[in-house]
Image (spheres, coloured by chain):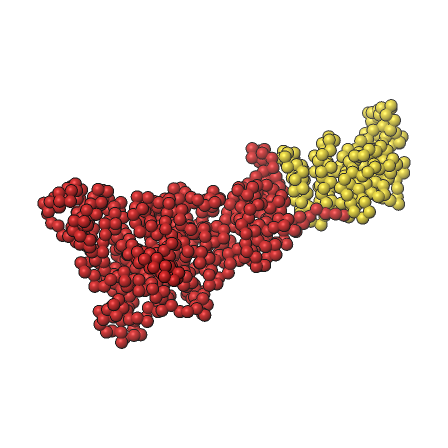
Chain colours: A yellow, B red
Amino acid sequence: MTTNNQEPNRIAEVVETTTTGFTAQCYELYGAPALGSLVRVGDPAVYAVVHNVTTAALDLGRRVMARGASEATEEAVYHNNPQISRLLATHIEALVVGHDVGDATKYRLPSSPPRIHGFVYCCDANEIAAFTDGLDYLHLLTSASTPAIDEVIAANLRLAAESHSDPDAFRIRAGKALAAELASDIARLNAILRGIS
Amino acid sequence: MSTNGNQSDPGKLMGGTPLGTVVGGSLSEGVEVKLNDDASVEDIPVGSYVVIQGETKRFFGMVNEVKLAATDARLRTTPANLTDPFVAEVLSGTAAYGTITVRPRLLLPMIAGSDVELAPARTVPAHFARASKASDADVAQVFGVEDDRHFAVGTPLDMEAVVCLDLKAFVERSNGVFGKSGTGKSFLTRLLLIGVLQSRLSSLLIFDMHDEYGWAGSDAERGRQVKGLKQLFPAQVAVFALDAEKSMGRPVKPDVMVEIGYGDIEPEDIMVLRETLNISEVAAESSYSLERHFGKGKWLKAFLELEGRDAIFELANDININTSALASFHSRLTNRFARLPFLVEKPSQDSVQALMDQLDKGNHVVLEFGRYGDDVPAYMLVANLLTRRIYARYRDRQMTESVENGKSTTPLSIVIEEAHRFLSPAVASQSTFGIIAREMRKYNVTLLVVDQRPSGIDPEVMSQIATKVCCLLDDDRDVDAVMTGTSGSRELRSVLAGLESRQQALIFGNAVPIPVAVRIRDYGTTDSYDSLMRTASRRSAGKKTATSIEDTPSPSDRSEPAEPQAAAGRKDDEDELFG
C-alpha cells in the first residue's frame, strides 16, 4: 500500500458497502480519521460520518501474535518486525448522512451505495462547514442503531464546530436541532449535549 | 447547499414581532401557539394582543394564558445540568418551551389598514399559522382612532397604540366602573366623563360623593389636586352643592345650592334606605301608612315633629302599626334627618327644576355632597330622590315627544358611586336606579355605576350593564359578579388578576370591539389637560355649541372675578334662572 501524495485527503478505499454505510480500508496502518469525522466518497459525493475504526490482521485466519516480550519499546516491536504493517490493516466504518445532487446537498440516503474501491476522502474545513450548515443529517445519525452512536454524534459536532467561524453559535444551533430530534428522550439529549459543551 | 435556518422569516411579513406557530386549540378555549426559540414567555403578558396569519384570514386575538411545557415529562423530575449555560440555552425553546393560548376574537382584513368592517372570529387559524405580536397599526385598526365618536382612554399594556372607546355605544346603555378601593376608579371615571362630555352625545348628572368631579379632584398617588370638569369645561358644567359651608370656602362658588324639602321625600325614598339605616321591613313600610295618614308631602315633617312616646303610640294605634317598630323608625329618622341642614321645610328653589334647566340646555350637572358624602344615608336619600323625579320627567317627556313628533330628548347618564347600596338585590326592585338599569335606554336615561363591591349589586342589574370598566378586584365574588354573562370570562379573569393596582383597567362590553386591558392615559399634568382640550376643540369645531351656563345669570357669576358687575342680588338671579 502506498500513500497518495497527489491527494493528501484521500485516506482509504471502500471494501464493503451497504445503503446505510460502508467499510473502507485505510491506506496507512492507523491512518484513520478521528471518530465522528466527515468523509466523502465517489462522484457525485456521498457523505458519511466515521463511527467505528478497526485495526486487525488482514488475513482473518491468522491471529496476530504478541512479539514484544524482548523489546524495550512498542516502536521497537514495529521496527524489528517490518512485516507487521503488511499483515495488519486499519478499517473505518462510516454511516451515510447525505449526498450531492447537482449543486445541492441532500441530507438523505443516496439511491445506491458507494461502489467498492471508491476512494474515501477526509473532508476539509470548508467542506465540513458547508455540509453542516444544514443539520438535517442529525436525524440519520440519531436513528442509527450502531453502538455508542451518541458519542459519535458528539464527536462529529465537536469537530464540525471547529470548522465554523462562530463555533459557539454552531454548537447552540446544533444543540437545538438535536433537541428537536430527541424531544422525547431528554436523558439521551443531555448525554450528547454534555459531549458537545 | 440548502439550509434550515431563518425559519421565522415568514412571520416578519405581518409587521409585529414573530412569536411562534399555532399547534393546536379550539375556538372556545383559544388556540395554542408554541413560541419560537427567541420569544420569551417573560415578554408576553396575559392580555397582550396577537395577530395570527392564517391561510386566508388574519385573526386578532388576546393572550389569555401563558404556559411552560417540556417535550419530555422526565425534564420535570430530572432537570438537565442548567448550570452549563450552553445546555440551558439549547434546552430553552426546544425541549423546554413556552406556549401561549390566544383566543381569536376578530377577523382583520388581509391587507393591513384597509377599511373593512371587522367581523367576529367564528373559526380558528389552521395548524402552523404564524403568530406575531399585534403591531400598533393592527391595534389602531381594531380600536379606532380618536375622533368625534371615539375617546382615547389609554394604551394597551406594553404597547404604544391608543385604545378608543366607542362613545355612541357607551352612552346608549348603562355602564359600570368597578375596582377595589384605591385602584383609581374616580380617576378613570373622570376621564370617561370628559370623553362623554366632549362628545355631546349625552348629558351627565353626577352624584359626586367625595367632590372628585366638580371643581377639583384629588390624585392620591401623587398627592396633588387635579382639575375637575368645571375647570376644564366651565361653560358646559354646572356645579350644584349640598354642603354650603364647604362650598363657600372655595374660590369659585357652586352654581346652585341644593335644598330638599321634607315634602319631596316619599315613602319610596325611605324604602331604599331600609338596609343602610337598618330599619325593619315593617317599619319602613309604615311610611306608606304615614303618608296616607298625614297626606302626601306632609307625612315626614309631621312624623318627625312628633314628640314623646305617647304621641307615637297613639299614632301607631291610629294607623295600626306595631308601636315599637314605629318608635324605632321614628328615632332612626329623627337621628338621621333632623340634623341635615339641606333638608328644609320650604326650599328656596326647586332643585329638580334647576337641574332640568341645565340638562335641557345640554349642560352637565355635578352635585357635590361635600361633607355629606361620608353620610351614606344622606347621599342615598338625595341621589334617589333627585333621580326619581328627574327620571319621571324624562319618562313623561319621552312618552309625549315620541307620540307627538318622534323626536327623542338628549340622553342622560346618571353617575352614582357606592352603587351597590342602591342596587342590592333587596333594594334594586324599589330604587329608581334599579328601574333605570333594567329599563335601560327606553326613556333615554342610563346609569354609570361606580362601585367597589359589584357582588353587592343585583345580578339582574349587572346583566344590563353593557360596558364594564374594571380595575383590580381581589374578592372572588366581586370578580364573579363582574364576569357573569361575559363570553370567555375564564380568560378575562386571569387578565383582570394580572392588572396593576393603579392606572390599569380591563374594559369589555359594548364600547370596545374586544376586551382590552388598558394603561389609563395620564390625567392631572398640564400636558394631559392640553391633550384633552385639543381633542375637545377639534370635536366642537363645526358643531353647534351647547348653550353656555353663563348665558343665563347664575349664582356663580358673582364669584367670577372677571365679572364684578354680577354682584347684584343673588335672589334675583335665582328667580330669573329658575323662574
Rendered view: B63 above or below B207: above
- Name the one closer to the observer, A67 or A102: A102
Quadrant (top left, top right, bottom left, bottom right) of the C terminus of chain B: bottom left
Q: Residue at x 27, y 71 (%)?
A: B558
As displayed, is residue A192 above or below residue B427? Answer: above
- Figure check: A191 above or below B452: above
Q: Position of residue B61 (x, y in %)?
A: 54, 49
The answer to which quarter of the image holds residue B151 is bottom left
User: Residue at coordinates 59% horizontally, 55% vertically from top-left?
Assistant: B109
**Residue B366 x, y percent position in the rendering:** 32, 60
Which residue is most to the front?
Answer: B404
- In depth, the one of A133 and B142 nearer the eye is B142
* Horizontal arrangement in the rendering, residue B42 relative to residue A75 (left or right): left
* Residue B323 located left or right of residue A76: left
B479 or A5: nearer the eye?
B479
Return the x and y of residue B360 as percentages of the image width and height. Answer: 34, 64
At a point 82% along the width and 38% down the height, the residue shown is: A111
Q: Can the viewer see residue A92 in this picture?
A: no
Give the side of residue A71 with respect to residue B442, left or right.
Answer: right
Rendered location of residue B350, percent (x, y): 24, 62
Number of callouts: 0
Judged from this view, the residue extending furthest toward the bottom is B565
Query: Residue B343 is drawn in which quadrant?
Result: bottom left
Residue A53 in view in this figure: yes
Q: Residue at left 48%, top 63%?
A: B147
